[in-house]
Amino acid sequence: MNFRQLEQFLAVAETGSFSRGAARAHVSQPALSTAIAKLEGDLCVQLFNRQARQVTLTAEGYQLMSSAKRIVGECEAVRSALKKTAEQETLAIGICETLDLPAIAALLEQFRRIHGTIRLKVLELPSGALIERLQAGRLDLTYLVRTGDETIPAQLAERPLNTEKYVIAASKDHRLAGQRSAPLSVLNDLPFIARNHCEYRTIIKQLWSEQSIRPKVVYQTAQDQRALELVRAGLGVGIFPESLVADDLAIVDIEDHSLSRRISCVWKRESQTEAVTAFLRFSQLENEPEEATP
């Protein structure tokens, strides 16, 4: 006995006719008669009283009908739920790899709890790669980092979230720990932890070259937390966005250069989906987005 046989059995039982049952089950009448006969053979009982113009259920047929309705109903409910899941709208979000992830992760988790029918897909990449994927339609919106040199395509809408400065981070027992600010030249000859993916990496190197500043690069990494651990261990100092530096590290402002970044949410205005609208509304970013600017 299988699910299809139960469906065909119910078609005959509920219509009271093999011909009408065949139409409902979308099979020929001979095929339906054969299927019912096989079901009766499998169960070793007679399910229908077959009369010239009428088909009625036997006692065994009535007993099976109750169970068949429950089984078929449960299967249909599962099928409907799975179909709904498969058709669930996806919201693809890009996050710049140098952003502080815990704060964004908390926002995404809150959104997921409220909008459970929207499936989240998150990708972490550099800002430039995220813009490319957004334009290609492979992302719905992105959290970007801008230092002022990037060009954002005009068809994108942008909502600035906040601006933060870059600072020198040192261990609490480092000789710089007692200073609130210092010139960039203070890094000369100091052990330095280099962040390979830093948005200001090229500019910082240029400033070092112009001012003959030569830090001793002792470690290079693309992982911010690893870089911070090395600073915390006293193996060197580093330049970080201020939001990444924990309270157990010393922060020294760079007094002779203004290095800052703007964090923005960017999305395609023309192809805004219901999922994007829901996320922007949830994040309170929906009203009055700025035109993306170079």
Image: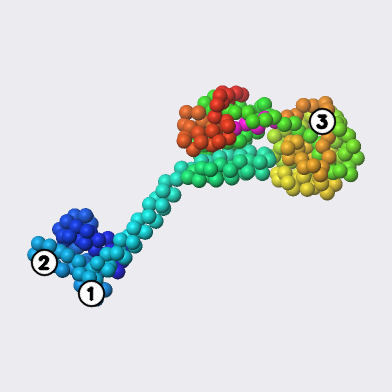
Please give the label number shown on residue 45.
1
- Mark 2 closeness class: few <14, some 14–19, many ≥20 residues within 10 Å: few
Answer with left or right where residue 127 lies relative to residue 3: right
Mark 1 or mark 3, whichever is nearer to me: 1
Which residue appears at 70% of the width and 44% of the height? 222
Which residue appears at 35% of the width and 56% of the height? 76
Please give the label number shown on residue 220.
none
SS of the residue under disc 3: strand
**Residue range of the region highlighted in magenta in the rendering:** 261-265
SS of the residue under disc 1: loop
Q: Position of residue 249 (x, y in %)?
A: 82, 42
Which residue appears at 73% of the width and 40% of the height? 244
Q: CA distance from mark 1 to mark 3?
A: 89 Å
**Disc 3: which residue:** 254
Answer with left or right where residue 34 lies relative to residue 291: left
Which residue appears at 24% of the width and 76% of the height? 44
**Disc 2: which residue:** 51
Between 245 and 98, the one nearer to me in the picture: 245
SS of the residue under disc 2: loop
Q: Is residue 281 visible?
A: yes
State whether the magenta stretch is mostly helix, strand or loop: strand
Q: CA distance from mark 2 to mark 1?
A: 17 Å
Quarter of the figure that contains the C terminus: top right
Between 256 and 87, the one nearer to me in the picture: 87
Query: Which circle's residue, 2 or 3, is located before the other in the chain?
Result: 2
